[in-house]
Amino acid sequence: MVHFVGAGPGAEDLITVRGRRLIEQADVIIYAGSLVNPALLTAAGEQCQIYNSAYMDLEEVISVMEQADKNRLTTVRLHTGDPSLYGAIREQMAELDKRGIAYAVCPGVSSMAGAAAALQVEYTLPEVSQSVIITRAEGRTAVPPKQQLSELAVHQSTMVLFLSAGLAGKVREELLAGGYAPDTPTAVVYKATWPEEKILRTTLDRLPDAMEEAGITKTALIVVGDVLGGEFAKSRLYDKTFTTGFRKGKDQ
Ligand code: SAH
């Protein structure tokens, strides 16, 4: 059996209780060494074999899982944040399917939640943005044409950009071309929830310069949108006059 486990954004106590238990019980752990906090591995048993996938290709990862499965051992594949976002788990699952190896997924706290907590921001504010676009700028990995940043910009929603810290110039250019105002509030969170976390607040127009000044080139999320600004409307859910399934609204 293979468990794909979300390690959380960095802080070692931001893994789920289930994820931690799976680490404690694992015979084999393959962790994404570039981003997973190695402190999480101290929960593993003494006999556990540990591999860093930063030095492995897909075939090597699968071969470790396959060997473990043959020996009736349990493997934990530890991915940063939540495995469903840019986790490259689908290709591993497809290989496991071919070999008839069972697997399960344990969710994790994504860095986008870690960044929101660091910024003390709500991504979805009434009348400001009720949608969040999770995306990336096109670099070495292609992005489908209809999902280019300039196309997505049309919605003026909250936008959370993964894997784009080295492409700030392109992010700025495409989002401006797509219609965001130059003074749209923009934030960068470097290593959210790690001790070395850094927060940068700027505008879309100033983004590349501000990032260069701060020396941030990787392991960061870029958040763009008016939810970072001062304006918002209150929710209906907690409005005194609003009736819900749990609470009857008052006249005034
Ligand atoms: N599955 C992960 C994302 C993996 S892709 C998740 O849910 O968070 C790797 C990218 O995620 C990095 O390039 C960076 O953009 C972002 N990232 C991961 N951890 C981060 C952190 N602690 N702070 C800021 N960004 C982070």
Image: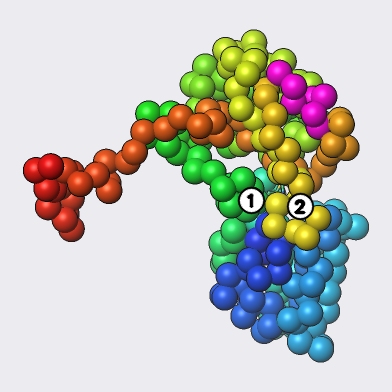
In the rendered structure, the answer to whether residue 45 lies left or right of residue 57 reads left
Residue 148 painted magenta: no
Does label 1 or label 2 sit earlier along the sequence? 1
Q: Look at the numbered disc 2 and say if its residue's Cβ is closer than 8 Å to ligand 1.
A: yes
Q: Is residue 42 visible?
A: yes
- Inter-mark Cα distance, 1 to 2: 9 Å
Q: Is residue 85 visible?
A: no
| Residue found at x 64% / y 10% | 177
Res. 26 image quadrant? bottom right
Region of the chain picked out in magenta, as a range: 205-211
Kind of residue indicated by mark 1? Ala
- Across and down, in percent, residue 63 comes to 80, 65
Residue at the spot of label 2: 197
**Residue placed most toward the observer, 235 or 176:** 235
Tell me which residue sits at (61%, 27%) in the image.
Answer: 185
Q: Nearer the viewer, residue 165 or 82?
A: 165
Q: Residue at x 12, y 42 (%)?
A: 252
Q: State the image coordinates of residue 68 (x, y, percent, origin top left).
A: 76, 76
- Dots 1 and 2: beta carbons under 8 Å? yes
Q: Quadrant of residue 11?
A: bottom right
Compared across the picture, whether 215 is left or right of 148 comes to right
- Disc 1: which residue: 118
